């Protein structure tokens, strides 16, 4: 079908990118192959059901939403938020009601055989082993190409020396240009090798069985407890963030209050200073008025005493 054709095209792009040493194109092609592989897997799993792909995806989406709400409900219970718990319960009831409207064959294993639903660890291990082996094959191809380029560089160096001794400068110049081209090509392969090393491929994909407990034919059944532990860890992290935010807010509050106290102190000081200056001014005016009035009175009485004498 069309998805498989696109997958083959992406694989061809990946091989071409590796041959040309284009690390960016190689990474894009690998990412595209992963997305197409997921789509093809979902298509294959849904073809066994007469309900079709759209109903299968809708059911999977509803179930995923209910699982996410379970995780949120744990957080709400741990944080003692009854309103959030009630809200989440209401949403879960609505999603469950929608699930009940879907055809029963979507949920029946006898009409929709999904091997990887019964053995999820097998699917994970197989995919990881294939991904790791593919990366190892690509790595060996790149290393072989780099070794071949090294041999070509050494051969070119010898030819340059012979051309220089024979004073064939034109040939030596062309060989030096070829040597630079080989060095650039080796650098591209080196970048591609770095991208392969950084790719997410687990060399030992088998899970820790002691951690998960009883798997029951490789099906992980003790997931709820692990989800609760993860939710508690997330709650602790959120609480730590809240504590840091509160400390920062309290610190900022103290700084602002200290600034306000300083401003109020300055305002009181300026007010007292203004009042003191105003009182001094009024006192000076009264003294000046008194002196003027006093001297005016003395001048008016002096002539009268002289007349009496």
Image (spheres, grey):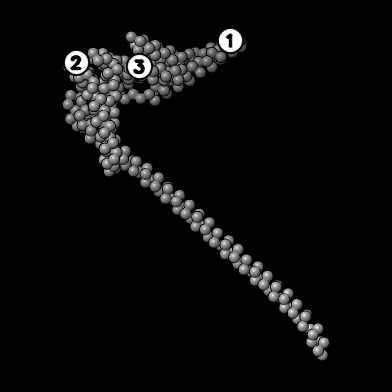
Q: Earlier in the sequence, mark 2 or mark 1?
A: 2
Mark toward the viewer: 1 or 3: 3
Locate the C terminus by quadrant: bottom right
Alpha-carbon neighbours of circle 1 within 10 Å: few (<14), some, or many (≥20)?
Answer: some
Q: Position of residue 207 (x, y in %)?
A: 25, 28
What residue does disc 2 label? 111
Q: Nearer the viewer, residue 298 or 85?
A: 298
Q: Earlier in the sequence, mark 1 or mark 3?
A: 3
Q: Where, by quadrant of the figure, is residue 161 drawn?
A: top right
Q: CA distance from mark 1 to mark 3?
A: 49 Å
Mark toward the viewer: 2 or 3: 2
* Up/down of 41 relative to 89, above or below: above
Q: Where, by quadrant of the figure, is residue 208 drawn?
A: top left
Marker disc for residue 36: 3
| Residue for point 34% across, 41% down | 238
Q: Earlier in the sequence, mark 2 or mark 3?
A: 3
Marker disc for residue 171: 1
């Amino acid at each position: 079908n069309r998805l498989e054709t696109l997958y083959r095209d992406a694989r061809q792009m990946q091989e071409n990118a590796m041959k040309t040493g284009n690390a960016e194109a190689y990474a894009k092609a690998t990412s595209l192959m992963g997305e197409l592989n997921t789509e093809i897997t979902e298509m294959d799993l849904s073809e066994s059901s007469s309900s079709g792909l759209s109903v299968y995806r809708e059911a999977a989406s509803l179930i995923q939403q209910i699982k996410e709400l379970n995780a949120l409900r744990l957080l709400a219970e741990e944080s003692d938020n009854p309103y959030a718990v009630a809200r989440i319960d209401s949403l879960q009831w609505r999603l469950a009601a929608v699930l009940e409207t879907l055809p029963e064959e979507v949920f029946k294993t006898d009409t929709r055989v999904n091997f990887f639903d019964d053995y999820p660890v097998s699917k994970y291990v197989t995919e990881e082993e294939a991904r790791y082996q593919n990366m190892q094959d690509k790595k060996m191809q790149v290393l072989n190409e780099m070794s071949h380029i090294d041999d070509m560089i050494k051969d070119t160096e010898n030819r340059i020396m012979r051309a220089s001794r024979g004073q064939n400068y034109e040939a030596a110049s062309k060989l030096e240009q070829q040597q630079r081209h080989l060095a650039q090509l080796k650098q591209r392969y080196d970048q591609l090798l770095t991208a392969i090393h950084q790719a997410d491929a687990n060399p030992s994909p088998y899970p820790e069985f002691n951690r998960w407990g009883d798997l029951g034919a490789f099906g992980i059944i003790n997931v709820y407890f692990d989800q609760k532990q993860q939710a508690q860890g997330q709650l602790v992290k959120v609480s730590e963030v809240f504590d840091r935010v509160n400390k920062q807010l309290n610190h900022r509050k103290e700084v602002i209050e200290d600034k306000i106290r300083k401003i109020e102190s300055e305002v009181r000081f300026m007010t007292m200073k203004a009042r003191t200056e105003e009182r001094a001014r009024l006192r000076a005016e009264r003294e000046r008025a008194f002196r003027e009035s006093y001297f005016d009175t003395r001048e008016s009485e002096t002539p009268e005493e002289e007349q009496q004498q």
